[in-house]
């Protein structure tokens, strides 16, 4: 008896609900999903303790979001500036002029027989990408706090898109480089076909450092103040303004621990035909991959608290 | 229909208090400082109430736990079947928002297991990721992707979304040139077209103007008719009983009641503060008061005299007190105090009717009404505390908490204190003030 009353009650309510619906009422049909082409997902949530799996499949599901966020970063960056895309060209170009003046002309830093401006510019390309990638990604989680506290998506997407959006700048300044190569002129060897691999090394290194810094920045806001020092110090530990041949052996091994050394040397070899990178590049790759994978795990471990902390 | 949409078992969520208030993040400097012992308090416990000889280690841990964390959810178990429309009710801080945050995976549970079958959409996320520099079109795609829509889905629904938002002619204009109302409409249009299997709603329907709100409700019902599951968090009991078949009641993080919506809402209202907008006492002897004066009925009324619970923020609210004077010769001050949900006293208002002010009252029935002006209170549920006092000699005849209650909703349309500002509008009151601007041309 009791049960019946309740059922009647709910029928009545359905009627009340349909008052708001202007179209003719349709029988509810649970069998048809309103979203053809998308299956009903099942999500299982359990508290994660300690080190957790990477769940990269989730990242694949949200790949379009990665694309849109990267695209947004690029678009917004240039919409808000007076000079727009010109900045992507001016930034490394002006740095190159300053470096050429002080290191090339005044200090007469040897540049492996290559005109100093292009020698420097080839190093500045991956370097500018790297330094802006870690600067942007370290701030990315805190900067997107409103998204993190409102919607679920794999948080990894945020620092990754911050790194990837730098690739567009890289592409633009690369066009300038091509012009310079004709101007000076320099002749790249067959190594140019390996250039994408060196770029990949730069991307993985940036991602590794970016993941560590972005996750740490959520909990320790002083990361923001540390990043400028990191990039400054790292610039001098990388052969951007000078040639790595200035260094002698005991230091070279230590130097190889810096993956950006391999990247810059690789770029010079691929584009300017200087000496190929030494075997030290294996160490560079190893350090880069370890930073990247440990960064992923650290990020995933900290991820569960982001929404509460950010 | 009997398939599950949401199932939680043994769900607990702990918040560290230092995460909730004050600085939520730490600084490395503090962490480094912690590595070194404090020079003045060698054991770090010398200020504690317990002797620092280590004889009460358990007590200290318990105290520490108590001070640093609170359980926002305690052992919450519940299932929602596919197609059910369930209301989630409870006072502020009962854990309703925490529950939604865990179900939407924004934050993780401390303990417990949750299974969700279907994509979850929530109206928490209206406008998330909107960027003012981007055009309406660009924002639709970006926002859709953030909510978990695939690009082909957005392509397919794009025209529908734009039509729903009523901003067609501005769709290729940067959103920064939109009025706030247009931004909200566009954001809501995207969220409404997510078409999730499970929809979580947290009282955001207070955005936009009345006609747009109606459109949103229609859209919600539309979604509901496809057999979708809706979880509806609200303070508005009449909406809950109107929209939901079933309701669950949360109190201090625990799910204490689960059943048909009317029953749970009724239970909540009576248990919480007997808080209807009308109250009388069948047995006069049991009514608040003494043999001098006794309260008989109390109610909240509209301008037209009808008893009412939910008021528009622009409407005046009448607080009516009916009482019997049983012994003549006393001058009486009836008054009431307005108390909000956080137990803050907003104000007290004394009956200042000059006809009876400080005059001895003859035996009989009196009815006093104090009018709270429209465009004065903020949104929320308000409780009335009623008091009757005599000054000479000083007697409190009755002093009754939570006698009646009413609710204020802000559905103003540019003519209230919030103008057309769509976001959170904090403050204990929301008066509409007279502003004057003087201009001094240079």
Image: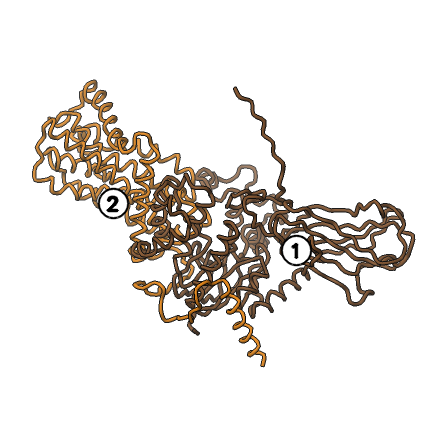
Chain colours: A orange, B brown
| Numbered disc in front, either 2 or 1 | 1
A4 w.r.t. B179: above or below:
below
Q: CA distance from mark 2 to mark 1?
A: 59 Å
- For disc 1, the chain is B
Q: Residue at x 30, y 46 (%)?
A: A160
- For disc 2, the chain is A
Q: Secondary structure at mark 2?
A: helix
Give the x, y percent position of residue A285: 21, 44
Residue A306 in view of the camera = no
Taking A20 as reference, is A111 left or right? left
Q: Which mark is residue B293?
A: none
Q: Which residue is more in the foreground, A22 or B328?
A: A22
Q: Residues within 10 Å of mark 2 (few under 14, many from 20)?
A: many
Examine the image and state in which quarter residue B199 appears. Answer: bottom left
Quickly name the residue at label 2: A204
Q: Residue at x 39, y 57 (%)?
A: B193
Q: Which residue is more in the foreground, B239 or B103?
A: B239
Residue B282 in view of the camera = yes
Taking A60 as reference, is A253 left or right? left
Q: Secondary structure at mark 1?
A: strand
A216 w.r.t. A89: above or below:
below
Taking B370 as reference, is B205 left or right? left
Give the x, y percent position of residue B113: 44, 64
Quickly name the residue at label 1: B406
Give the x, y percent position of residue A66: 30, 49
């Amino acid at each position: 008896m009791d049960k019946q009353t309740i059922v009647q009650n709910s029928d009545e309510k359905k009627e009340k609900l349909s008052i708001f619906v202007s179209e003719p009422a349709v029988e509810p049909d649970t069998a048809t999903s309103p979203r053809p082409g998308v299956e009903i997902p099942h999500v299982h949530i359990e508290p994660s303790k300690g080190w957790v799996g990477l769940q990269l499949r989730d990242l694949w599901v949200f790949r379009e979001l990665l694309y849109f966020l990267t695209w947004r970063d690029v678009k917004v960056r240039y919409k808000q500036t007076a000079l727009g895309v010109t900045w992507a060209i001016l930034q490394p170009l002006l740095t190159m002029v300053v470096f050429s003046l002080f290191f090339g002309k005044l200090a007469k830093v040897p540049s492996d027989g290559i005109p100093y401006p292009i020698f420097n510019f080839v190093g500045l390309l991956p370097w500018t990408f790297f330094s802006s990638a870690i600067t942007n990604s370290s701030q990315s989680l805190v900067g997107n706090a409103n998204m993190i506290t409102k919607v679920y998506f794999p948080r990894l997407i945020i620092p990754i898109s911050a790194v990837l959006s730098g690739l567009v700048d890289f592409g633009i300044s690369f066009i300038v480089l091509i012009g310079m190569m004709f101007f000076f002129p320099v002749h790249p060897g067959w190594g140019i076909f390996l250039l994408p691999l060196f770029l990949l090394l730069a991307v993985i290194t940036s991602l590794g450092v970016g993941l560590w810094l972005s996750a740490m920045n959520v909990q320790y806001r002083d990361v923001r103040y540390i990043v400028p020092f990191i990039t400054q110090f790292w610039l001098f530990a990388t052969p951007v303004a000078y040639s790595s041949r200035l260094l002698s052996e005991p230091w070279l091994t230590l130097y190889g621990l810096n993956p950006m050394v391999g990247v810059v040397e690789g770029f010079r070899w691929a584009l300017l035909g200087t000496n190929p990178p030494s075997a030290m590049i294996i160490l560079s790759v190893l350090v880069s991959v370890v930073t990247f994978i440990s960064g992923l795990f650290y990020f995933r471990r900290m991820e569960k608290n982001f929404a509460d902390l950010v | 229909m009997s398939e599950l949409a949401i199932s939680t078992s043994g769900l607990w969520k702990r918040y560290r208090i230092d995460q909730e208030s004050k600085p939520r993040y730490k600084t490395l400097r503090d962490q480094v400082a912690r590595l070194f012992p404090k020079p003045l308090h060698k054991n770090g416990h010398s200020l504690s109430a317990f002797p620092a000889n280590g004889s009460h280690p358990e007590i200290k841990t318990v105290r520490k736990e108590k001070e640093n964390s609170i359980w926002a959810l305690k052992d919450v178990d519940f299932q929602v079947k596919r197609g059910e429309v369930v209301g989630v009710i409870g006072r502020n801080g009962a854990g309703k928002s925490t529950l939604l945050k865990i179900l939407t995976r924004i934050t993780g549970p401390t303990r417990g297991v949750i299974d969700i079958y279907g994509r979850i959409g929530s109206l928490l996320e209206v406008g998330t990721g909107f960027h003012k520099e981007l055009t309406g079109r660009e924002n639709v795609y970006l926002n859709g992707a953030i909510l978990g829509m695939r690009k082909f889905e957005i392509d397919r629904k794009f025209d529908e979304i734009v039509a729903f938002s009523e901003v067609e002619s501005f769709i290729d204009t940067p959103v920064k040139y939109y009025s706030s109302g247009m931004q909200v409409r566009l954001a809501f249009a995207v969220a409404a077209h997510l078409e999730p299997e499970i929809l979580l709603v947290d009282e955001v329907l207070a955005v936009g103007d009345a006609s747009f709100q109606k459109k949103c409700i229609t859209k919600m019902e539309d979604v509901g008719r496809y057999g979708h599951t809706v979880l509806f968090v609200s303070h508005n009991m009449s909406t809950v009983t109107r929209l939901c078949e079933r309701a669950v009641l949360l109190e201090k993080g625990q799910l204490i009641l689960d059943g048909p919506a009317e029953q749970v809402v009724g239970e909540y209202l009576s248990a919480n503060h007997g808080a209807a907008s009308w109250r009388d006492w069948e047995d006069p002897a049991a009514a608040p008061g003494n043999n001098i004066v006794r309260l008989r009925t109390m109610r909240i009324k509209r301008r037209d005299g009808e008893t009412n619970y939910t008021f528009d923020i622009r409407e005046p609210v009448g607080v009516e007190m009916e009482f019997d004077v049983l012994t003549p010769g006393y001058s009486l001050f009836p008054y009431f105090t307005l108390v909000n949900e956080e137990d803050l006293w907003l104000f007290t208002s004394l009956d200042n009717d000059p006809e009876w002010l400080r005059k001895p009252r003859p035996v009989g029935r009196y009815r006093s009404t104090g009018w709270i002006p429209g465009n004065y209170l903020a949104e929320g549920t308000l409780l009335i505390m009623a008091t009757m006092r005599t000054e000479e000699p000083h007697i409190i005849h009755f002093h009754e908490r939570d006698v009646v209650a009413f609710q204020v909703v802000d559905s103003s349309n540019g003519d209230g204190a919030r103008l057309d500002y769509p976001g959170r509008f904090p403050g204990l009151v929301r008066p509409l003030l007279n502003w004057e601007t003087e201009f001094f041309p240079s």
